[in-house]
Amino acid sequence: MNEIFRGRMIQTACDPTFERHFKGHKDKITALCFHPNAIQLVSSSLDKTLLVWNLTESVRAYRFIAHKDGVLDVCYAPSGEAIASASKDRSVRIWIPKVTGQSIDFRAHSSAVRSVQFSPDGKKLLTASDDKSIKLWTVCQRRFLTSFSGHTSWVRCAKFSPDGRLLVSCSDDKTIKVWDITSGQCVKTFNEIKAPAIYVEFHPSGAAIGSANVGACVKIYDLRTGSLYQHYAAHKGPVNMIKFHPKGNFMLTASSDSTMKVLDLLEGRPIYTLRGHNGSITSITFSQDGEFFTSGGADQQVLMWKSNFCKDDQPRKISKQLISSINKRKRDDVDGKSHAKSDKHEEDVYEEQKDEHLLDTLGELDLESNRNYYKGPINEISLKKVEPEVINMKNIKSRERDHIANVPILQDQMLFHARSSNQSVKAVEALHNQVQSLHDVINVLEQRLTVLEETFRKKT
């Protein structure tokens, strides 16, 4: 059966499908974020603007202008009542995503702000910058709380753990650091030998972290053992961003090689290759329920996709998880009994408290409302034909070069050997070169396979 389809020519119910195409930015897309209820999508760009797309009305979008330089990151608050943006102009701005374009800003760092994120409870804001620092702020007063210092070069990204107790960050200094928020101390460091990570985030379980690497690979680290858990060399160019599916069994990757990959983390291999952008894919994100994902690129376009690949995940993998939750493991150690009802009640109360707090917070903010900050609505859905391509790789035999699972190498041990022995470094370099050679050979074979499949499709 033909494994390739274009646009809406769906072959199986579990294949990702292209849904919509948005165009309104005038420079590279830098970040994307769904509203928690998936009623809106916000995008940021080097064109110094944000675009808030109303997903219930396909032709309406609002452009917000206030930053004086390119916007590098954007995110919704957990309740969806506010948006935070970070910019090259060294400021962070908090927006109300409505037609009036109300916002406040504050000077957060002494250099470009690369990353911004609300805490899980919505009370705090985390920022990371080219000034080598990570900072924590209160949303209400815009008050500085603490900084996390230890990186020796630009900090590309910083993210909260799902429970809000830890942070993870990556830097051009070739390190990934995990921080304890309460003590402010770095509790674990992962060292990259060759190329640095440019994006990191926690697995939904909180027990692992994933990283996108300049060296065209994706890595998953187990926080409990401090070891490299999985390694994927599935791309031909730098990986710009990774996103875990909310269920935790899949990962979406975006690369400068103009492709996205869907990785099945339980099987340890890529299962889909997606194409649709002309040039580097710079940003991706899932909706909160995982039903949709979007991608943005250097081609200034935003593409929206329906996931579908998780449809058969429930019956196939219901008893299996990639990495179990740290919190769940602790509860099981104390008491093996089920606390589902109690946990559900606590979760509902927590969500109510988050919403109430943010609404109170927004009421206390001294918001600016300036029509110069807002231009919209705009009817900017491009009429240009978009033909995304999805390659189903499920029936293609897994290759070792794509995936190395459960690597039993502790980071401290790896660093020790690399520093203490030139022979070890040379061995690692030689191994890397061999893997790269295999990578190139397989890429050629993949291209030939694609040509054959396309020829077969045309004949059928």
Image (cartoon, rainbow, N blue to C red):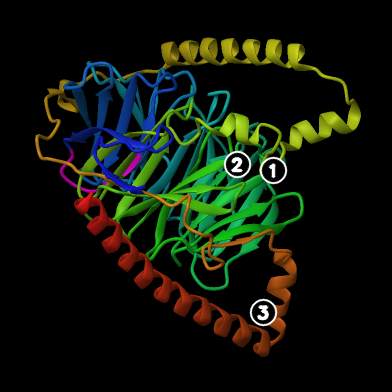
Q: Position of residue 447 (x, y in %)?
A: 32, 66
Would you name the residue on which mark 2 appears? 203
Residue type, label 1: Ile
Q: Residue at x 67, y 79 (%)?
A: 418
Depth check, front residue: 54 or 257: 257
Magenta span has 28?
A: yes
Element assignment for label 1 = loop
Would you name the residue on which mark 3 appears? 418
Residue type, label 3: Ala
Instruction: Report the span colored magenta.
Output: 25-31
Depth check, front residue: 40 or 390: 390
Would you identify the image quadrant in which residue 331 lies?
Answer: top right
Q: Position of residue 286 (x, y in %)?
A: 43, 34
Which circle marks residue 174 in the picture?
none
Would you name the residue on which mark 1 appears? 323
Cβ atoms under marks 3 and 2 closer than 8 Å: no
**Marks 2 and 1: which is nearer the front?**
1
Cβ atoms under marks 2 and 1 closer than 8 Å: yes
Magenta span has 340?
A: no
